[in-house]
Amino acid sequence: MTADQLHLAKELDELKEAGINWLHCDVMDGQFVDNLAMGPYEVEYFGKMPDFTVDIHMAVKNPEKYVKMFAPCRPDYITFHVEAAEDPNAVIQLIQDEGIGAGIAISPDTPLLTILPYLNQVDLVLMMTVKPGFAGQAFREDVLEKLDQLTQYFEENFTNENRPLVEVDGNINPVTMAKMQDYAVDLYVLGTSALFNEDPRSYKEKADEMYAIIGK
């Protein structure tokens, strides 16, 4: 959503040079959130790139419809919002039946308990640290408590090898990343506050600053 759409090939080369090998693609329907973003033809372009893991975040109503629409793009993961699904189990099964990793997303105001019944089934948990829909929002500090609860839940119910991956999305930058180092966070979605902004440094220089924080 925040990369330079007119120069994608150049953007991807620079991201790869920076050691970034995941692409987070936001799909929005204008109903679940008040914004529109990315159709199948755009995502299909990324799905053909072997150097990147493609992760589709569907901020949409009726996620089953969009799973069927985007599965032919062959992403590695499709993530849907628990708030949008009448039957999350059915959506998870639909995604996994396509041979795609299933992710479940949770918005800042949704209690963590809402997703706990599905953690044994999903491959990825997306914790939103802003309200989904628009870039540039303030980081929700209260989500840190939810991350703490999730980390404790994993410690009590999973081994580190068999738990779902945890991804955070929303005003992720060096300052907010530093606040999450004690929690079970594996993936950071970088947007306008970290990469795609007016800071003249290269993507590699910006990424190196963040790698230092997470010890990579």
Image: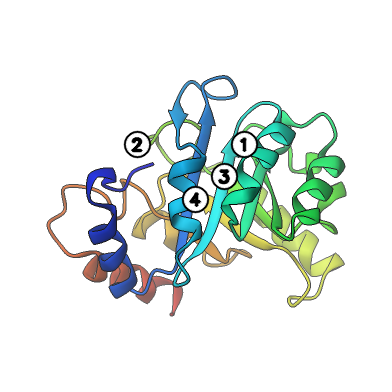
Residue type highlighted by circle 1: Ser
- Nearer-the-camera pick, 36 or 99: 99
Q: Residue at x 42, y 31 (%)?
A: 134
Q: Residue furthest left?
A: 200
Describe the element under mark 4 as helix, strand or loop: helix
- Residue that numbered label 3 is attached to: 57
**Mark earlier in primary sequence (2, 3):** 3
**Mark earlier in primary sequence (4, 2):** 4
Residue 189 pos. (x, y %): 46, 54
**Mark earlier in primary sequence (1, 4):** 4
**How many residues crowd mark 4 within 10 Å: few (<14), some (14–19), many (20+)?**
some
Taking the image as drawn, is residue 179 in sight?
Answer: no
Image quarter in which the N terminus is found? top left
Describe the element under mark 1 as helix, strand or loop: loop
Residue type highlighted by circle 4: Glu
Above or below, comparing residue 97 to residue 58 in the picture: below
**Mark earlier in primary sequence (3, 4):** 4
- Residue that numbered label 2 is attached to: 136
Label 4, label 2: how many angstroms apart (C-alpha)? 26 Å
Label 1, label 4: how many angstroms apart (C-alpha)? 26 Å
Image check: 9 left or right of 152?
A: left
- Residue that numbered label 4 is attached to: 44
Taking the image as drawn, is residue 196 in sight?
Answer: yes
